[in-house]
Amino acid sequence: MLLSRFPRVSLAHLPTPLEHLPRLSKHLGGPDIYVKRDDCTGLGTGGNKTRKLEFLMADAQKHNADVIITQGAVQSNHARQTAAAAAKLGMDCELIFEKRVSDPADAYVNSGNVLLGRMFGANIRDVEKGTDMNAEMESTASDLRAKNRTPYIIPGGGSNTIGALGYVDCALETLGQANRAGLVFDHMVHATGSAGTQAGLIVGLKSSCANIPLLGIGVNAAKDAQEEKVYKLAVETAEFVGAPGIVSREDVVANCDYVGDGYGLATDGMNEAVMLLARLEGLLFDPVYSGKGLAGMIDLIKTGYFEDTKSIVFIHTGGSAGLFGYSDILKT
Ligand SMILES: *Cc1c(COP(=O)(O)O)cnc(C)c1O
């Protein structure tokens, strides 16, 4: 697969490291656990959206955009990385935040990703929970066009075929590292939300005939809805890269048993997982995505799902800036 066919700007520190977690592996007494450090992509404290933005921002430049519009939850990592990318490329940035959490703490609305988004110079607007976010972005775009601006809309999470290319690339990069290091991975695990990460990884793995099953741990939707969303985007992404038909429905597996009370709401498992990794490996995960993904992986190891698995690679999608927005609910 030749991703250099697609317009791309350099935003991420690549390749990200692939590291063994010996203390966590020993502690859990299950498979050997490796972590792909996509928390270290480098842009504005990093995370998985930076890989997607390399392709999305190139497309924005192709369309002569001078202002980027995107949306997310108040503590959106995607919005923060988009604001940083826009700053770096000399574009303005409009962030529309859906107030998904009721009764938020002061830190939630002012610290973490929100603070960084403001520092990157983004214009931030909050809307009520349940707002049609795509319609909001469209109306912001028409207002800007009326002022002779050229807006470019990036969907929530950067999850469309263009953004998913970033995770096709991550799959290829990880396989290259495994090949060079002589590592065999029996399973790949990560947190799945707006679907671009999982869809891209599936296309990258399938196109390389890697034969590594991929498990997305859901943070929002129920299993069927999540899998359908990922499947649809994976099929479209496969077509987009010129490999139609390589993705089958069975390739898409999500476990959505670790969402808890809802998107962005803390669970005990998340709290324990985030503290465990901090104390055993000096690694930071986040309360909304990677922490819940990790909680799922740890519980599935303990309950035997990975019984015949010798090694797992966990794709660390980042999000540690969000820790500061959730300081009140983290049980240190
Ligand atoms: C957005 C995000 C995810 C989920 O990725 P999707 O492509 O939206 O499924 C996982 N982890 C972190 C930290 C994120 O910010």
Image: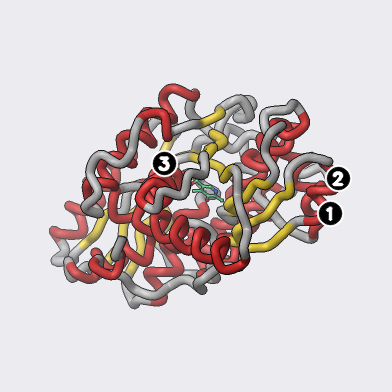
Query: Which residue is more in the foreground, 96 or 315?
Result: 315
Secondary structure of the residue carrying numbered label 3:
loop
**Mark linked to residue 27:** 2
Disc 2/disc 3 C-alpha distance (Å): 31 Å
Mark 2 residue element:
helix
Say if mark 1 contacts mark 2, CB within 8 Å. yes
| Mark 2 Cβ and ligand 1 under 8 Å apart | no
Quickly name the residue at label 1: 23
In this picture, residue 138 sits left or right of residue 196: left
The residue that appears at 61% across and 53% down in the rendered structure is 184
Residue 280, image quadrant: bottom right
Check disc 3 and report the residue beneath it: 195
Depth check: give the residue in front, 267 or 148: 267
Q: Amino acid at mark 2?
A: His
What amino acid is at disc 1?
Answer: Arg
- Which residue is drawn at the image coordinates 25% and 42% (left, top)? 236
**Residue 100 placement (x, y as % from top left):** 51, 35
Neighbour class for label 3 at 10 Å: few (<14), some, many (≥20)? many
Is disc 1 placed on a helix, strand or loop? helix
Q: Is mark 3 within 8 Å of ligand 1?
A: yes
